[in-house]
Image (spheres, rainbow, N blue to C red):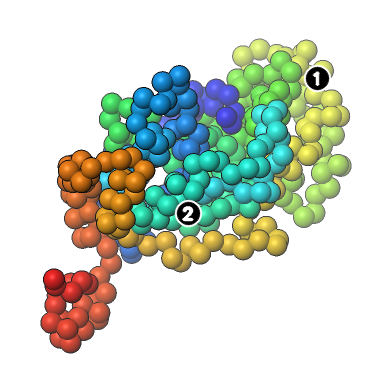
Amino acid sequence: MGIPGLWKLLESSAHVMSFKELCLIEGPILEYRQTGSIIMGVDAGLWMTQCQTVFHKPHHAQMGSNPELRALLYKLVQLVQAGVVAVFVFDGPERPAVKRGKQVKTKPHWLVKGFIEMIEIFGFYHHQAPGEADAELAYLDRLQLIDGILTDDGDVALFGARRIIRKMNKANLDEITVYTSASMEEDPAVQLTQGGFLLLALMSGGDYNTVGVPGCGIGVAHALARCGFGDSLLEACNSPVIDLALFLPGWRKGIRKELVTNSRGYLQSRKLALARKIDSTFPDTSVLDLYTHPTTSWSPGFSIPAFDSWIIKVPDLANLAKYCHEKFGWSSNVIKTKFEKSLYPSLFVRRLTMPLDVHQQIQNHVVHGYVNDEQPQ
């Protein structure tokens, strides 16, 4: 998924930290959004695929009722514990028909209905992109409508994401690895911009063309990206005054020259054979267009998501208990034990970070005689 070998390439630009610490600092302490929390975008399809893969085993029937949904439940609990507002973005009908050489399935994933029900019960949000979820998430991040993207798909960097968050340590579920566009661009060993990521995908292979330029690995593509060839290509694609057909011959000539001479010194050696493969068919302009002009909610003919409604909420515990009983067969005692261990402490903190409507609280006290947002029993 995405560009092979990308995360290894980005290692030195990554920052490992606590998820709860990140959310606490930027939410209640610094109050970046004046809401007591930060908003995290999540690739819903990737979560479903990961949970389905874990339980794709011969003994699936011995793992209890709906193990995939149960795994998703525990992942949602982690988000509650971190104190974030989560927005789950699903792929839409306008995504590319072919991805990684395979026909994209148009039928909704069988987990979608149950997952959406859980998302709503937890007080989180969901949104279906018109096209690819990763392109939609990156656009939301670029517009600063969310504060980061929780994903393992590096393509969000290619689409312009500002901050990518990965959770990789199964021994410490609070540990995250953070990549920012600034750190990836400024790290001397990485020096990758959005245009650089574009060139990596085009030359070493990505979701829309798995081969790239035959014989070109990620190391060579990275060296050329550091020379600025990706930046100039992206600028040409987005410019209203540059004719791409007239731009590309000179651009290809520059790449061939650098492969032959290694004038910038980023290549480990000169690549004469590879230079001969940079012909008039590179890059595939249809693939280039998918990367540079993806379909999002801001594309003509589509509606933007209701991002003004993305505020912090608490889970609906009554409906969550009912859901757990119906889907997983948990008894009342099991539900009580699990909620006390995993949810109750987090809900207390979540309540404290929720914005307080002072006028409503005064009215509740003066008119109705109670001091919170719920009438006493």
Residue 54 drawn at (x, y percent): 43, 26
Q: Which amino acid does label 1 sit on?
A: Lys
Q: Residue at x 55, y 22 (%)?
A: 5
Q: Nearer the viewer, residue 61 or 126?
A: 61
Residue 326 placement, left or right of 104: left
The residues tagged by marks 1 and 2 sit, at their Cα atoms, a distance apart of 44 Å
Compared with residue 299, is residue 355 higher up or lower down, i.e. above or below? Answer: below
Q: Nearer the viewer, residue 325 or 30?
A: 325
Answer whether residue 184 is visible to the viewer in this image: no
Residue that numbered label 2 is attached to: 126
Instruction: Please identify the quarter of the rendering in which residue 194 is found.
Output: top right
Q: How crowded is mark 1: few (under 14 residues within 10 Å), some or many (20 or more)?
A: some
In this view, the residue farthest toward the bottom is 367
Q: Quadrant of the C terminus?
A: bottom left
Q: Is mark 2 on a helix, strand or loop?
A: strand
Residue that numbered label 1 is attached to: 277
Q: What residue type is labelled 2?
A: His
Q: How crowded is mark 2: few (under 14 residues within 10 Å), some or many (20 or more)?
A: many
Q: What element carries label 1?
A: loop
Residue 245 drawn at (x, y percent): 86, 42
